[in-house]
Image: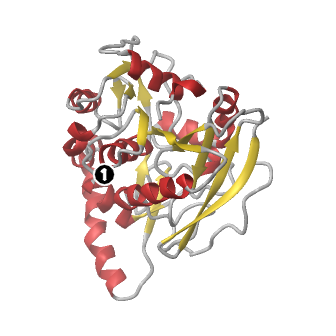
Amino acid sequence: MPTEEDVEFLISGDALRGRLFRPDDAPEPPPVVILQGGLGGPAESNWGMAGAFADAGLAVLSYDHRGTGYSDGQPRQQFDPWQQCRDLRDVITHLTLREDVDASRLGLWGVSIGGANSMFVAATDRRVRALVSIIPPVSGWSARALQPPETLAELEALIPLDRQAQLRGEPAATIRLHGKPEPGRPVMFSDHEGLEFVEKMIHGLPSFRNEITISTLDRLFEMEVRAYAERITAPLLMVLASEDTVAPVEEARRCSSGSPSRRSWSSTPASTTRSSPSTSRRSSRARPAGSARSCDRAGRAGARPAGGDLAAGDGDVPARLPADGR
C-alpha cells in the first residue's frame, strides 16, 4: 500500500485540498503524476487508482478544484476550466518545494475536462514532462452542438439571467449535473449510460454534489484547447472514443495532429471507457496511430503507469477529508 498524506495548498486565499500517495519503498523521491477527473467528479473518485501508479514507482496527487469537494472557494460547485488551469500551475509550484517527490519528472493525467485542462497546462508550462489526455473536449464551443437544440436553448437562456441575479447580490444559481429531464428542472447530462455510471461510481462519495452553477456553462463554452495544441512539446498520449457523445472525437484527433510533440492516440475498445462522471462514450475497435517511443512512455505512465518512464449553491464545504478515502 502506498503512503497517504492529506495535503492542502493555499492559492489566492483559498485552500485546495487533496491526497498525495507515495510508493513505500522508493529509493529516491519518485516522479509525480497529477490526476484530474471529469466535470463534477471529486478528487476522491481518483484515489482508488493511486495504488496502481504507486506500484509502478510513481507518486500520485489528486485534489479538489476551487469551490468544489473538500476545497475552499465560492461560489460552490462552479467549474471554471481557465481558473482550474491557473490553480494547477500553482499546485505544480507547491510540489517543486517538496523534498519527497521529484517534480522535475512531473506528468499530468486527465479524463474529460481534466484531460482538456491537462493539455492546456502542458501547452503553457514546460515543467510538465509527460501528458495523458483521455476523451478530452478540446472545444467548448463545438461541444455545445452535442446538446439537443431545445436543451441548449434552455441552458443558454439561463446564463444572462444568472449574471443579472448575481449582480443584484443573489447567490449563484445551480442546475443538476446528471438526471432525467423534467419540465422546469434543467439538467446538464441526461443520457442513460452516463446516469448509470455516476450512480454506481460517483454519487455515493461524500464530496460529490449533483449540481453545477449556471455560470459554469458560460465558462465551459469558453474553453478552447485547440488554439494551444501547437504549443504542446511534452510527450502526449490521447485516448479517444470513436462514438463519443460529449467530446467530438475528430476535433480531438486534429488537435493532437496540431501538436509538435511526439504523440500517439488510440480509440478505446467497444466495452466503453467509463472514467468520467459526465460522459456517455462508446467506441469501436482500438486504433493506435503515430506512436513514438517517448509518447509510448507517456502512455504507460498514464494508462499503465511505469515509474521510470516519466522523463523529467449552499456554501458548505465538507468538514474534513475522510480517513479511508470514502
Nearest the camera: 233 or 51? Answer: 233
| In this view, 32 is above or below 94 | above
Residue at the extreme bottom: 168
Image coords of residue 14 (percent x, y)? 53, 72
As drawn, is 125 to the left or to the right of 38? left
Residue in the picture at 40% in, 58% down: 186
Q: Amino acid at mark 1?
A: Thr
Dot 1, how many residues are within 10 Å of its Cα: few (below 14), some (14-19), or many (20+)?
A: some
As drawn, is 297 to the left or to the right of 223? right
| In this view, 57 is above or below 284 | below
As helix, strand or loop, the secondary structure at mark 1 comes to: helix
Location of the N terminus by quadrant is top right
Image coords of residue 118 (percent x, y)? 40, 43
Snapshot quadrant of residue 190: top left
Count of marks placed on residues: 1
Image coords of residue 26 (percent x, y)? 72, 33
Whether residue 37 is visible: yes
Residue in the picture at 54% in, 62% down: 68
Snapshot quadrant of residue 72: bottom right
Image coords of residue 31 (percent x, y)? 57, 37
Whether residue 326 is visible: no
| In this view, 273 is above or below 191 | above
| In this view, 286 is above or below 302 | above
Display coloring: secondary structure
Residue in the picture at 62% in, 44% down: 101
Nearest the camera: 139 or 168? Answer: 139
The residue at which mark 1 appears reads as 151
